Amino acid sequence: MAPLKVCFFLNAQTHMLMHTVPIAISLSHDRRFETHVMAATAAHIEHARAMALKGGAGPIGFEQVGGRWLERAARFTGASIPPKLLSLAVASRRLMSFDAVVLPERTSLLLRRMGCSHLRFVHTTHGAGDRAIGFDPRIRQFDFVLLAGEKQRRRMLAKGLIREGRYAVVGYPKFDAVALCRPKVPTLFRDERPVVLYNPHSSRALSSWERMGEAILRQAAAEPRYNLIVAPHIKLFDRHVDRLRAERLLAPYRSCANIHIDLGSSRCIDMTYTTMADIYLGDVSSQVYEFIARPRPCLFLNAHGVAWQSDENYAHWRYGRVHDSADRILDALDSARDDHGTYLAAQQKGLQDTFDMGQEPPSARAAQAMAKFLLRPAAKASGGFHA
């Protein structure tokens, strides 16, 4: 029997590679499948190739769709990637020859309407946070969904987003990507002050950046009690015009010895900063779960006056103090350090609920679960399982 052709289609910013390419690497060793990675930018393909080389991948076909004209479209819009719908229109013809497509995002489900209705769609998700967007109603359109842990399984089942036999709990493949990609943790500061990671999210309706970001920088610069890493979600300043505006705002702080600013390098996605920081300062990013993989103090910023206490979309705010303004932020960080023991049990419980830690690497478990699903007859597709 000819191998099934599976395409890992990367139609979003680089952070989503971390959630998909490790699975492609694992699947490439299974001769029952022909594994491909497709993207609209040369940078994505280069990054994926480098990961595959470091990960000892088997045969993988790498393909940039659209060529330079799609990249010119990205430059025209000022974004790091071409418009998603344009990329889908170009990729759809090529994808018609595949049996399955693996996606970390949901917009690419539109391929079903572009002549690819025969494909089986597999969702890897991207991140394992608590926000409602992580439980998007479109998830129910996927044929198979790979989940990081019990929290996702429980919430998605409750919302009718997944069906028995059409999902698997496999752990968090990004942890495998980090092991492949991240170089030695750098030395960013000349002293031993505690390091704070300020990680505002890109959602302007929920992010603390616009209302609190500059005030936090101003206080850190005026009283260098802490070393501060400013590393927002890479989508916050993805558009060229937004980045230029931010660079002008941040220019006075770049000379501060205790402040390191990174608006979108690979360190923002490979857990460099979540690993090296002593304290997490943020709002709603799922990166808090990557931070508490080694439990440490957290301080959360409620920039929009949210009544969060009984809202499951803010479950992570139970892992540390919640501060309702940028006033006296350094004192609030002091208190977060002093009170960490109060929140340690909640962090440990949340971590266990979010990431299923199995004996095998998550990417291997994900590849095995996909293989079981894609190869078994549809009539036998009943009963969810842990891989």
Image (spheres, rainbow, N blue to C red):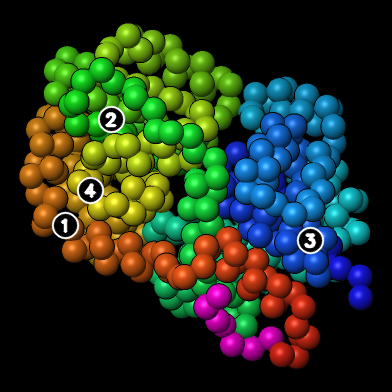
Q: Which of 332 and 372 is in front in this view?
A: 372
Instruction: Compare marks 4 and 2 and give the one earlier in the sequence.
Output: 2
What's the amino acid at mark 2? Answer: Met
Closest to the camera, between mark 3 and mark 2, is: 3
Instruction: Compare marks 3 and 4 and give the one earlier in the sequence.
Output: 3
- Residue at image mark 2: 212
- Residue at image mark 4: 296
Q: Which SS class for mark 2?
A: helix
Q: Which residue is drawn at 70% across and 52% down?
A: 57
As measured in the structure, the alpha-carbon distance from the residue carrying label 3 to the one carrying label 1 is: 43 Å
- Residue at image mark 1: 343
Up-down relation of residue 327 to residue 39 (above or below): above
Magenta stretch in the rendered image: 381-387
As measured in the structure, the alpha-carbon distance from the residue carrying label 4 to the one carrying label 1 is: 9 Å
What's the amino acid at mark 3? Answer: Val
Up-down relation of residue 332 to residue 148 (above or below): above
- Residue at image mark 3: 6
Q: Which residue is drawn at 48% across and 65% down?
A: 171
Instruction: Compare marks 2 and 1 and give the one earlier in the sequence.
Output: 2
Closest to the camera, between mark 4 and mark 1, is: 4
Q: Which of 378 and 203 is in front in this view?
A: 378
Mark 4 and mark 1 in contact? Answer it, CB < 8 Å.
no
Task: Check the picture and name the quadrant holding the C terminus.
Answer: bottom right
Mark 4 and mark 2 in contact? Answer it, CB < 8 Å.
no
As measured in the structure, the alpha-carbon distance from the residue carrying label 4 to the one carrying label 2 is: 22 Å
